[in-house]
Image (spheres, helix red, strand yellow):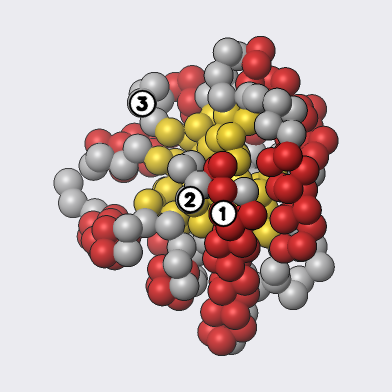
């Protein structure tokens, strides 16, 4: 079997040294398995129960990315399975992830979510808030030993205005660069800029994304 879109996305990611996460939310296990058989190993989910269901049915070498808004009381469910939690936006959530990481005898990699979009409903931290939170963690390395901050995640506005998307993406990427400059101790692992979806992935790659989260382009429209 051949999947032209997957090949094309992989090719573009390679040219930009970016990683491709296939966002499989709401799609059946078989759809994930099809891409798995073509070599895809990174999959993204938004809902806790769905991630747990899929992770327990599919091969263990899949790297599961939790990309949705995560409630503190749900961290325990995904902790055994998750490889990267993308949308961390508070100290209390970090605290809970740290606790569940230690219970599972692992380190959990996370990204801090930057808020840039014009829409009011999106979660995340303004760049200044994000850097303030990071500086506190960086100054207290023993505070969250079970958590490793690996970079930032962001979502640009859902708009046709490409210049606006580009500006917002520059802010997301700039926040990663500021974070690295501010916490040089993290330089080895704090390298991920998770931005770009089906509608804006090309702009994202041009603006320094290192990880695309692509759903509908790979799996077709969601219900
Ligand atoms: C659903 C989702 C995606 C994928 O969106 P597509 O437009 O289907 O590519 C990416 N990131 C997040 C956070 C999502 O919720």
Residue drawn at x 48%, y 50% as measured from the top left: 191
Residue drawn at x 70%, y 71% as measured from the top left: 117
Q: Nearer the viewer, residue 182 or 73?
A: 182
- Which of disc 3 and disc 2 is earlier in sequence? 3
The residue at which mark 3 appears reads as 61
Vertical position of residue 171 compared to residue 2: above or below: below
Q: Secondary structure at mark 3?
A: loop
**Side of 81 relative to 8 (left or right):** right
Q: CA distance from mark 3 to mark 1?
A: 29 Å
In front: mark 2 or mark 3? Answer: 2
Residue 5 seen in render: no
- Which of disc 1 and disc 2 is earlier in sequence? 1
Asked whether the beta carbons under mark 2 and mark 1 sit within 8 Å of each other, the answer is yes
- Percent x, y of residue 48: 65, 33
**Side of 5 relative to 171 (left or right):** left
| Residue 138 position by quadrant | top right
Count how many numbered circles sit on residues in the image.
Answer: 3
Q: Secondary structure at mark 2?
A: loop
Residue drawn at x 58%, y 57% as measured from the top left: 181
In front: mark 3 or mark 1? Answer: 1
The residue at which mark 2 appears reads as 191
Residue 81 seen in render: yes
Asked whether the beta carbons under mark 2 and mark 3 sit within 8 Å of each other, the answer is no
- Which of disc 1 and disc 3 is earlier in sequence? 3
The residue at which mark 1 appears reads as 180
Residue drawn at x 51%, y 57% as measured from the top left: 193
Q: Residues within 10 Å of mark 1 (few under 14, many from 20)?
A: many
Q: CA distance from mark 2 to mark 3?
A: 22 Å
Q: Nearer the viewer, residue 106 or 74?
A: 106
- Percent x, y of residue 194: 52, 55
């Amino acid at each position: 079997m051949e999947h032209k879109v997957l090949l094309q996305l992989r090719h573009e990611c390679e040219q930009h040294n970016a990683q491709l996460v296939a966002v499989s939310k709401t799609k059946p296990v078989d759809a994930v398995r099809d891409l798995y058989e073509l070599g895809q190993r990174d999959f993204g989910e938004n809902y806790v129960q769905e991630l747990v269901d899929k992770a327990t049915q599919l091969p263990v070498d899949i790297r599961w990315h939790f990309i949705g808004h995560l409630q503190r009381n749900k961290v325990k469910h995904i902790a055994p399975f998750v490889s990267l939690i993308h949308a961390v936006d508070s100290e209390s959530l970090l605290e809970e992830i740290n606790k569940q990481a230690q219970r599972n005898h692992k380190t959990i990699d996370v990204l801090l979510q930057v808020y840039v979009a014009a829409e009011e409903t999106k979660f995340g931290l303004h760049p200044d808030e994000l850097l303030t939170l990071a500086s506190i963690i960086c100054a207290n390395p023993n505070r969250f030993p079970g958590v490793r901050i690996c970079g930032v995640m962001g979502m640009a506005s859902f708009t046709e205005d490409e210049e606006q998307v580009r500006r917002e993406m520059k802010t997301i990427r700039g926040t990663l660069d500021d974070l690295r400059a501010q916490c040089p101790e993290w330089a080895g692992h704090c390298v991920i800029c998770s931005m770009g979806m089906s509608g804006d992935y090309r702009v994202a790659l041009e603006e320094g994304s290192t990880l695309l989260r692509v759903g509908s382009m790979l799996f077709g429209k969601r219900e």
